[in-house]
Amino acid sequence: MTIEFRDVTKRYPDGTVAVNGLSLTVDDGTITVLVGPSGCGKTTSLRMINRMVEPTSGAVLLDGKDVSEGDPALLRRGIGYVIQHAGLFPHRTVLDNIATVPLLSGWDKRKARARAAELLETVGLPKELGKRYPAQLSGGQQQRVGVARALAADSPVLLMDEPFSAVDPIVREELQDELLRLQSQLGKTIVFVTHDIDEAVRLGDKIAVLRVGGVLAQYGTPSEVLRHPVDDFVASFVGRDRGYRGLSFVSANGVEVSPVDVVELGTRLAEPTKSWQLVVNSEKQPRGWLPPNSTVDGELAEDDLVAGGSLYVQGTPIRGALDAALSSPASLGVVVDDGHRVVGTVVAHQVLDVIEATPQAS
């Protein structure tokens, strides 16, 4: 389902203009990210799609139909909506939270709860959590429940207002991965609001950069916005390190992956280590590094290890390879396969040589 803003303006009674002449089209089955500083009208624009905010002038269209022509309540039931802090009902169980919209749409309770249980698994949560209340969940689990609730009516449109900004960075990355996985399966039309350009670049098929006053500054693919900002405002907002972010769109072909010896957790070391040792679990997934000259009393455990930096998933863009090499305490970036099993290592200088030799990275 396409979403179109046609010269949309929102002006409040005190004269404040939150959105000014916004015109853009969100293509069917894509993720469009609205990004910009505080006060640029991101959330206002999002809420005009489901009529939580009414435009002063202009029109918002869903598949060519003006949203103002129907019942706002019916419109909202047909649009998934995810907000910061999940917005769950504290007095309802997880299953009943997810079942809210199907129940409002006339489903019987058994069918609605069965759908809710399916969606728990869809968003990567065990069914047992369905009987708990929101306060018994972690922040990341609550956000997943919020996504499941938004998917419950199987609507083609999903609106997400800074849904991951209240969780820690590790959980945030996991939730971003989960959203991308779900989108690859479900193909929703998603409008996502964030103030974080890295999140926008990671998630968006298109990025709309808004400036204060609700004016659209630039609309394009992440690569276009990073490499060809239209003015000083966009260049400043995406950051002076936009060239580094642009590596998210550069292939890692040519980066040499070297074999690496590993030590498994539970091993007893016969003598002190001579160099950095990569430690893995029984499934050959990296758990950390053992520094040179280390000795271990008994079996090697995770408490003996130094955190290993980021991991580079083989076949993904070159930015991940450089991140892994630079963040590793051993100066060896750990390369893993899709199952996070060790493939080998990369070194920063060789990654940089490949970047320098790649025309699209310059």
Image: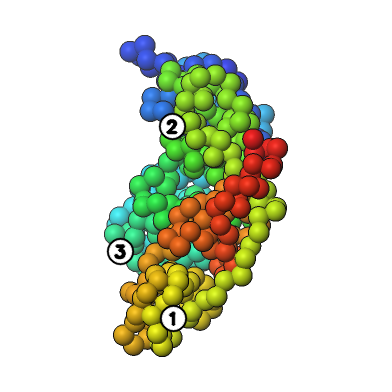
Name the spot of residue 196 as percent of width and height, x first. 44, 38
- Tell me whether circle 1 and circle 2 mark residues in contact (CB < 8 Å): no
Residue 165 sits in quarter: top left
Q: Is residue 264 left or right of residue 259?
A: left
In the depicted view, which residue is nearer to us: 201 or 256? 256
Q: CA distance from mark 3 to mark 1?
A: 33 Å
Q: Earlier in the sequence, mark 3 or mark 1?
A: 3
Residue 265 — which label?
Answer: 1
Nearer the observer: mark 1 or 2; the answer is: 1
Q: CA distance from mark 2 to mark 3?
A: 29 Å
On-image quarter of the C terminus: top right
Residue displayed at 41% across by 28% down? 37
**What residue type is disc 3 on?**
Gln
Residue displayed at 44% across by 75% down? 274
Name the spot of residue 258 as percent of width and height, x first. 62, 65
Residue displayed at 69% across by 42% down? 358
> As displayed, is residue 181 above or below residue 283?
above
- Tell me whether circle 3 and circle 1 mark residues in contact (CB < 8 Å): no
**What residue type is disc 2 on?**
Thr
- Tell me whether circle 2 and circle 3 mark residues in contact (CB < 8 Å): no
- Give the residue at mark 2: 43
Kind of element beneath mark 3 = helix
Name the spot of residue 97 as percent of width and height, x first. 40, 56
- Give the residue at mark 3: 136
